[in-house]
Amino acid sequence: MLIGEYIHTIDEKNRVSMPAKFRQELGKKIIITPGLGQCLFIFTIKEWQKVSQKLSDSDSDLSFLKADQRSFNRYMFGRAAEVEIDSIGRILIPDFLKERIGLKNSAAVIGVKDRVEIWNESAWSEQKAIVEKQAEQLAEKLGNEKS
């Protein structure tokens, strides 16, 4: 399971190190794609296949007939990139994804169970503060949805 919060610098070649605790689980190749909110999502190849299957509407495999699904698939798949993790655990973040979330000198690397999120460090601090204030209400709401 991918968990934890790490702040890493971005080198002059746009590379960021994956936390040592994540490297074994991520493998040698990953998928990086625009996330929801102000972050990027990183999936293992295996997890990306699961996401792809869910987004393709496995009931009919005609997801392209639904406008909302087409639009969201373009968002997720159209800007996704397969990236290799180098021998010392770094990934190269494509410029178009780096620019999307305003990455400059450092990134917050967040483990979120089945994926990793990459955040601009200041945007992550803001998001974290918002969620911390709402944690009790969110838990209550999610608890009520399960019953």
Image (spheres, rainbow, N blue to C red):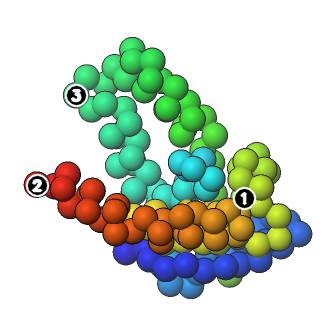
Dot 2 or dot 1, earlier in sequence: 1
The amino acid type found where label 2 is placed reads Ser
Q: Which residue is mark 2?
A: 147
- Count the labels in the image: 3
Answer left or right for 147 relative to 56. left
What mark, if any, has residue 93 been given in the picture?
1
Q: CA distance from mark 2 to mark 3?
A: 26 Å
Image coordinates for residue 89, horizontal then vertical, percent:
64, 77
Q: Is residue 30 above or below residue 56?
A: below
Residue at left offset 30%, top offset 65% = 139
Which residue is at 20% across, 52% downward? 145
Is any atom of residue 53 visible in this view? yes
The crowding category of the residue bearing disc 1, from other C-alpha atoms within 10 Å (few below 14, some 14 to 19, many at least 20), is many
Please tell me which residue lies in front, 14 or 85. 14
In the picture, measured across the screen, residue 136 lies left or right of residue 124, that is: left
Amino acid tagged 3: Asp
- The CA span between labels 2 and 1 is 41 Å
Q: Which mark is residue 27?
A: none
From the image, which quarter does the C terminus lie in?
bottom left
Q: Is residue 85 visible?
A: no
Residue 8: x percent and y percent?
Answer: 70, 78
Q: What residue did someone put label 3 on?
A: 59
Which of the two discs, 2 and 1, sits closer to the camera?
A: 2
Q: Indicate the position of residue 21 as horizontal and vertical percent values.
A: 50, 84
Residue projecting furthest to the left? 147
Q: Tell me the residue at 71%/67% (across/down).
A: 122
